Amino acid sequence: MTNRPTDAPAVRYDFLVVGAGTAGAVMAARLSEDGLHRVLLIEAGVDTPPGQIPADIDDTFPSSTLNPAYFWPGLEARMADGREPRPFPQARVMGGGSSIMGMFALRGMPSDFERWRAAGAAGWSWEEARRVYRKIEREPARGEGGDGTTPVTRTSPREWPTFVSALRDAALANGFPYVEDINEAPAEGFFPMPTTRNAEFRSGSARCYLTESVRRRPNLTIMANTVVQRLLFNGRVAIGVECEHGGATMTVLARHVIVSAGAIYSPALLLRSGVGPAQELASIGVKPVVDLRGVGRNLQNHAYQFFALTLPRDKRLAPTLRRFAMAGLRASSKLQDCPPGDLLLFAFGRVSPQPFGTGVAMLGSALYSPFSTGTVTLQAANPQAAPRIDFRMLGDPRDAPRVVMAARLAERLLRDPTVAANYNEAFLLPPGMALNQFNRSGLAGLALAVGAGAALDAPGPLRRFALRHVAGLGRPLAQRRGNDAPSDGELLASIAPMGHPVGTCTMGDARSPSTVVDDAYRVCGVGNLYVVDASVMPVIPSANTHMPTLMLAEHAAERITRDHTHVAPGVMGAA
Ligand SMILES: Cc1cc2nc3c(=O)[nH]c(=O)nc-3n(C[C@H](O)[C@H](O)[C@H](O)COP(=O)(O)OP(=O)(O)OC[C@H]3O[C@@H](n4cnc5c(N)ncnc54)[C@H](O)[C@@H]3O)c2cc1C
């Protein structure tokens, strides 16, 4: 396998961005802003240009998360050693995860960014992260930030299904404060969930950054349906990529290559191109360019589980409201070494875009500051082979007790009489059963929607029979008391990894062998190569990872443009 281009293309870009996800869309828009640097953005998935954004992506209920056309096929992950691999969805579409995700818009806790600095990522602090977040968020409710790129809004408590208001009351009665704006006042408490949407559409990074005026820039080119197979080097300097489009292989040259393929595919691309642990690469036939031990290590993710609740007709979200996340509760385990706000509960008001969807709600519980780490490795050098993902969740002894604490808090609130008066039944769901459990495509989906609608409105015994024996939801929580209550083992067996992988190209002190990028996002040991996406986070934030990734990308764009303003752009236009 060679690492040199095979032919000489006509154009050489100043910046080539691999992946148009949450981070890549920001990078392309910001780096082309000066009108001078020639920028190429390459995305494996379909384009969703303004005016042609599919309805399921625009939907303010995350219908797109149910569309397999927007995901990498065949990707699986092992939650723990010895467990069978299960499907692990990662986005493959313009906007990446921001086009398919659940739209939670959390910034994280101040301690998250202090922990980044402690891990060797110089310059990070809550003040710095907050400065960039304020630049991104367009929050009319805050009476500020009218010019942020990304609308963020909350479902008003007036619109919540009654079980969410009851959860709030129960949380307050249990000593938690009510926090109006969890992003500006990050602390323990019950809060309305900020979401990346406005009343009409999802505010993903494709819509908010790759706008009509950005796409009209003559110095920005966007190539969709194009998969980068590997990076090209001259010695230890990145000079471009080899990619596949419509069955043809092409070489594209660039002065700077920015890898924004996400926390699974960025390390996979680096490894396939010879950037990674040299011995491991040699064993699968990849010629090492640089021996970088940290690539694919330090994989982190949140562990979650769900309780599903069936709701009486008069206690549901209004059917016209296509909403998902309603509210959250941040709590602290207060266990030794564990940061504040390490546990999160979140309440969903509907489980399907179909009319029956408001008849079921969910309460999730999650560990938001895990210590366990895993790996992304290659199974083969062939770009068609899916990378291997081993999360090794609960590998660190500090994690399992906190997973149980979060689930027990959810269970306690659900058993509170104020809350219990607002639902019919509550069930602990098996691992990974969430929206996919309640939705199918095609005829099976229609049959499920009709059947579920009828079952949810049926009299109690019939409803419980259908939920237990047809839907397979098991015994309701209310019937599970004493010895039959969910055991710690059952709670631990019900967890699954969230869609929040980070850390596999970790940012840190360039002198540390585990570091992959320095504080200027440059890959250590190679020239002209950067990684900018969720993979560079040294420690997973106590937040869903879209907003932290968006913030990182804005930060990286500031840094990279500053470092390149002195270079006359476009001078390398002809190869
Ligand atoms: C099901 C799900 C639900 C989620 N819900 C939430 C939520 O509610 N709130 C939240 O904050 N976060 C959520 N997330 C997480 C969030 O979407 C991610 O953290 C975020 O999108 C990461 O951004 P990224 O730029 O690192 O990667 P991505 O957004 O994944 O972008 C990577 C892009 O690179 C492309 N790519 C990869 N390899 C190549 C290649 N070789 N050639 C060309 N293109 C390539 C991919 O197709 C993809 O579009 C969710 C994620 C998932 C999967």
Image: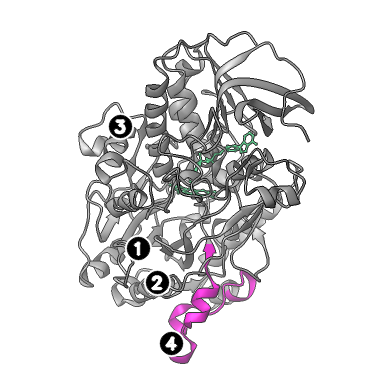
Label 2 vs label 1: CA separation?
8 Å
| The residue carrying mark 1 has its beta carbon less than 8 Å from ligand 1 | no
Q: What's the magenta region? A: 468-496
- Marks 2 & 1, CB-CB < 8 Å contact: yes
Check mark 4 vs ligand 1: CB closer than 8 Å? yes or no.
Answer: no
Q: Are marks 3 and 1 in contact (CB under 8 Å)?
A: no
Which mark, by number, is residue 402?
2
Residue for badge 4 = 481
- SS for callout 2: helix
Name the residue located 52 percent from the left edge and 69 percent from the top edge: 395
Instruction: Using the image, determine if residue 489 lies above or below residue 369.
Output: below
* Relative horizontal placement of residue 525, taking residue 85 as reference (left or right): left
Mark 3, residue position: 135
Local secondary structure at mark 1:
loop
Quarter of the figure with residue 389: bottom right
Task: Return the disc, 4 or 3, that comes first in the chain's sequence.
Answer: 3
Q: Nearer the viewer, mark 4 or mark 3?
A: 3
Closer to the camera, 432 or 300?
Answer: 300
Q: Earlier in the sequence, mark 2 or mark 1?
A: 1
The amino acid type of the residue labelled 4 equals Arg
- Looking at the rendered image, the quarter that the N terminus falls into is top right
**CA distance separating discs 3 and 1:** 26 Å
Between circles 4 and 2, the one closer to the viewer is 2
Q: CA distance from mark 2 to mark 3?
A: 34 Å
Residue 252 x, y percent position in the rendering? 67, 21
Q: Dot 1: within a 10 Å radius of its alpha carbon, few (fewer than 14), some, or many (20 or more) residues?
A: many
Camera sees residue 439: no
Q: Which mark is residue 342?
A: 1
**Residue 121 in the image, given as x and y percentages of width and height:** 38, 45
Residue type at mark 3 is: Lys
Vertically, is 395 above or below 453? below
- Residue 356 x %, y %: 52, 56
